[in-house]
Image (cartoon, rainbow, N blue to C red):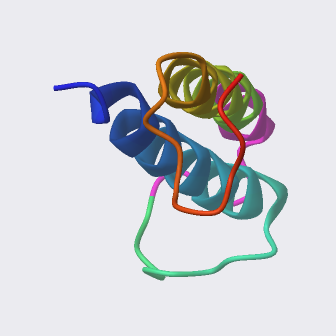
Amino acid sequence: MRSLPLVFGILGLLIGLIWIGQGTGYINWPQSSFMISQIQWAWYGTALAVVGVILIWRGRRYRTRHGRACPGHPRL
């Protein structure tokens, strides 16, 4: 449950980057996609990627603040 924001953040970031690539025309997969070279999907992808980064930051911040960091990291 505590790592849920981290998981959703990573998924949001990855999907957002794919949408940016499709919206700008750099990713032409799948070729029949309605999102290819449609700039509004690049903007949607940017928004989703920003939300993903915020979720990743919040998830990592929660883990380190509550002493659940990886071994070798100091407790804050």
User: What x and y, as percent, mark residue 56?
Assistant: 59, 34
**Boundaries of the magenta span:** 34-44
Residue at point 53% right, 61% down?
A: 71
The location of residue 66, given as percent across then percent down, is: 47, 18
- Residue 41 % position (x, y): 65, 37
Determine the residue positioned at 67% across, 20% down: 54
22 sits to left or right of 30: right
Q: Nearer the viewer, residue 45 or 30?
A: 45
Q: Residue at x 47, y 53 (%)?
A: 34
In the image, residue 38 lies in the stretch drawn in magenta: yes
Q: In the displayed structure, would residue 35 be above or below residue 55?
A: below
Which image quarter: residue 53?
top right
| Horizontal side, residue 4 vs residue 54: left or right | left
- Quadrant placement of the C terminus: top right
User: Which quadrant of the figure contains the N terminus?
Assistant: top left
Question: How many marks on residues?
Answer: 0
Q: Residue furthest left?
A: 1
Q: Residue 45 at x, y = what percent?
A: 66, 37
Corner quadrant of residue 17: bottom right
Please indicate whether residue 18 sits to the left or right of residue 27 in the image: left
Q: Nearer the viewer, residue 25 or 75?
A: 75
Q: Is residue 12 above or below residue 22?
A: above
Residue 24, relative to residue 44: is it above or below?
A: below
Residue in the foreground of this view, choosing between 62 and 53: 62
Classify residue 16 as left or right of residue 43.
Answer: left
25 is within the stretch colored magenta: no
